[in-house]
């Protein structure tokens, strides 16, 4: 079962980030209330992936989050060593997690070349981590969207999209640097109660329109693929929303 995408538009990127941060606080507290045990959050890289965390950290209600229950996963990671400033994990930690008491064992980071032999080995160990510690269904899954319509590290017309029977995939020749990455597969991106797309900027407007167009194909527009079981929401600024209803680039 999957939900029909909803769209929420904010006037500018800062307003969008602040609103998304508030929504994330409420979403995490709601997940804490609705079930016992770990709350599983899937994070994203890119500018919005950290902007939402910075906004969350600035909220007075941030103390309501039970950090010891929160488990962090990544929709994708750039295959770079731990601590590299270009890693999604590093950027997300700088934005929020280095200043909150989250237990290190709750951080399910993707191995880089410092701790794995290859991108394939890293993808396999991330899949094993998911199997051992992951949920049946993530509570909230965050996704940025590229101007080409990519999500996580699943790019238009890239063979990594076709990975089947596995929760993760090794990605080579990514059109967005760096070329080597590890991504969740579509199969895994679909296992979330809530999927939130976070998108700002006019350069994303066509990708947003194409992803929301009826009949969009994820091979052409990967962002049209993931749907939350209960909620799929596109959180946009006005620039990114500017071409909704104006699909047909492909
Ligand atoms: C990455 C990200 C990627 C990102 C989008 C949007 O590793 O680069 O995971 O999927 O979320 O490219 O990035 P921006 O928000 O910076 O445009």
Image (cartoon, rainbow, N blue to C red):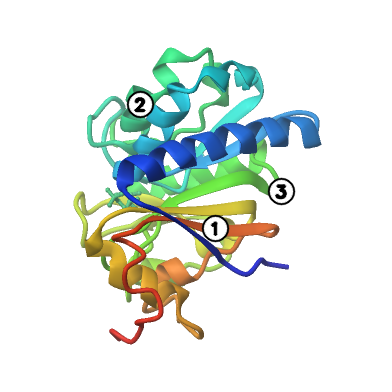
Mark 2, ligand 1, within 8 Å: the answer is no
Residue drawn at 35 percent across, 44 percent down: 48
Mark 1, ligand 1, within 8 Å: the answer is no
Quadrant for residue 187, please give it.
bottom right
Position in image of residue 137 (x %, y %): 69, 49
> From the viewer's perspective, is residue 202 above or below residue 19?
below
Say if mark 2 contacts mark 3, CB within 8 Å: no
Q: Earlier in the sequence, mark 2 or mark 3?
A: 2
Disc 2 versus disc 3: distance between alpha carbons? 28 Å
Residue 174 in view of the camera: no
Q: Earlier in the sequence, mark 3 or mark 1?
A: 3
- Tag 3 residue: 136
Quadrant for residue 27, please give it.
top right
Disc 3 versus disc 1: distance between alpha carbons? 21 Å
Quadrant for residue 222, please give it.
bottom left
- Tag 2 residue: 95
Left or right, 225 with reference to 33: left
Helix, strand, or loop for circle 2? helix
Helix, strand, or loop for circle 3? loop
Helix, strand, or loop for circle 1? strand
> In which quadrant is the C terminus drawn?
bottom left
């Amino acid at each position: 079962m999957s939900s029909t995408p909803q769209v929420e538009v904010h006037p500018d990127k800062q307003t969008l980030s602040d609103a998304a941060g508030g929504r994330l606080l409420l979403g995490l507290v709601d997940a804490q209330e609705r079930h016992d045990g770990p709350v599983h959050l899937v994070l994203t890289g890119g500018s919005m992936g950290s902007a939402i965390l910075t906004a969350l950290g600035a909220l007075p209600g941030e103390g309501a989050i039970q950090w010891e229950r929160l488990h962090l996963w990544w929709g994708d990671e750039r295959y770079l060593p731990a601590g590299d400033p270009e890693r999604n994990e590093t950027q997300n930690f700088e934005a929020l997690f280095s200043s909150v008491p989250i237990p290190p064992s709750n951080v399910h980071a993707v191995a880089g070349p410092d701790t794995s032999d290859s991108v394939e080995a890293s993808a396999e160990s991330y899949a094993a981590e998911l199997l051992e510690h992951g949920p049946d269904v993530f509570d909230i899954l965050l996704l940025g969207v590229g101007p080409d319509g990519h999500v996580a590290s699943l790019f238009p017309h890239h063979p990594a999209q076709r990975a089947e029977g596995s929760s993760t995939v090794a990605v080579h020749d990514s059109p967005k640097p760096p070329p080597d990455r590890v991504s969740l597969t579509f199969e895994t991106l679909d296992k979330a109660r809530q999927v939130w797309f976070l998108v700002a900027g006019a350069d994303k407007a066509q990708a947003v329109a194409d992803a929301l167009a009826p009949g969009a194909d994820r091979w052409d527009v990967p962002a049209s693929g993931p749907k939350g079981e209960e909620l799929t929401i596109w959180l946009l600024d006005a620039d990114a929303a500017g071409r909704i209803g104006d699909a047909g680039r492909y």
